[in-house]
Image (cartoon, rainbow, N blue to C red):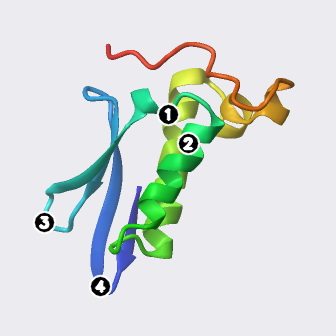
Amino acid sequence: MSTKDKGKRTEVRINEERLTLDFVSPEGRVFYYVPLERVTNSESALDWIMQVARKRWATDRILGTFVKAMDAAVEARYGKPIQGVLCSLAMGGAAGQPIPEPWRKP
């Protein structure tokens, strides 16, 4: 997933080996990452979204790309999008309910 900001392309990639979402500069350098093992419930997902949102470099487009990449990573792992896995109302559970199985490196 990528976005263009001021003529530059910033990508958010799922790194399956490290279990991270990597923010990659136009030069191909990972300059920030989110460890998926620390996304364990809806509160932690929102916390990471807000941490990224507060970064000086996080434009609206980058933030949107990040949210979509997190959704894609959860769906690839659990077979359902993030709302169906982490959001308590979608799961029929209580707030803060953990994901069914923790992230594990292959």
Mark pair 4, 3: CA separation: 13 Å
Q: Secondary structure at mark 2?
A: helix
Q: Earlier in the sequence, mark 4 or mark 3?
A: 4
- Nearer to me, 86 or 73: 86
Q: Secondary structure at mark 4?
A: loop
Evaluate if marks 3 and 2 touch, with contact meaning CB atoms under 8 Å apart: no
Evaluate if marks 2 and 1 touch, with contact meaning CB atoms under 8 Å apart: yes
Disc marking residue 45: 2
Q: Which residue is mark 1?
A: 39
Residue 29 x/y as whole percent: 14, 57
Mark 3 residue type: Glu
Please name which of the two marks, 3 or 1, marks the residue nearer to the observer. Answer: 1
Mark 4 residue type: Gly
Mark pair 4, 2: CA separation: 29 Å
Identity of the residue drawn at 15% across and 58% down: 28
Disc marking residue 15: none
Residue 40 x/y as whole percent: 54, 28
Residue 3 x/y as whole percent: 40, 69
Residue 60 x/y as whole percent: 50, 74
Q: Earlier in the sequence, mark 3 or mark 1?
A: 3
Q: Which residue is mark 3?
A: 27
Mark 1 residue type: Val
Q: Which residue is mark 4?
A: 7
